[in-house]
Structures are given as structure tokens and as C-alpha cells.
Image (spheres, grey):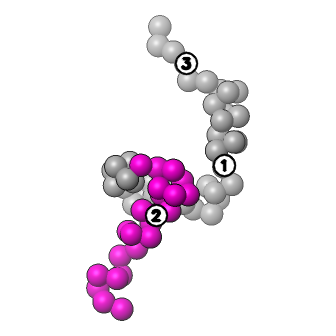
Amino acid sequence: MSAANDWPFDRWLKIAVHVLRISPSEFWAMSLIEWHMLTAREAQTLRRESLTELQTQFPDEKDL
């Protein structure tokens, strides 16, 4: 394996765009820590439907 193949960014970008539906610009703006938190096994249990439910139950407060 060459040094160029040691970096997993191409694979990660495909996961971000096709699985997590993150835009390429959002992916490249992330830190490695953010990527790890987003893709950690524990974080994968929160699906889009669950997030939508949480957003409905706990909407962002509007600035007054």
C-alpha cells in the first residue's frame, strides 16, 4: 500500500455524502474529532427520523 492510499478521506467523503447526506463542503469543514463523533458506533443509533422527533419535541428557541 502506498502512502497515498493510507488516507481514508475518499471513502469517508463517500460515506458523508451518500450515507449521512452531508455536503462535501460540510465534510471538508469538519475536524477529525467531529467526524469521529459523527461516525462512532454509539452515534449511529440516532437516525434522521429520531432527530426529527427530537427537533419537534425540543425546538430551538427563537431570539426575542
In magenta, the rendered stretch is: 1-23
Kindly report which numbered mark, 2 or 1, lies closer to the viewer in this rendering.
2
Q: Which residue is mark 1?
A: 47
- Residue at horizontal 62 percent and vertical 63 percent from the top: 41
- Residue at horizontal 39 percent and vertical 69 percent from the top: 10
Q: Quadrant of the N terminus?
A: bottom left
Q: Gap between marks 2 and 1, in whole Å?
A: 18 Å
The answer to whether residue 60 is left or right of residue 56 is: left
Amino acid tagged 1: Arg
- Residue at horizontal 63 percent and vertical 57 percent from the top: 44
Establish if 12 lies above or below 20: below
Residue 61 is tagged as: 3
Kindly report which numbered mark, 3 or 1, lies closer to the viewer in this rendering.
1
Q: Which residue is mark 2?
A: 14
Q: What predominant SS class does the magenta segment belong to? A: helix
Magenta highlight on residue 8: yes
Q: Secondary structure at mark 1?
A: loop
Magenta highlight on residue 21: yes
- Of pointers 2 and 1, the one earlier in the residue sequence: 2
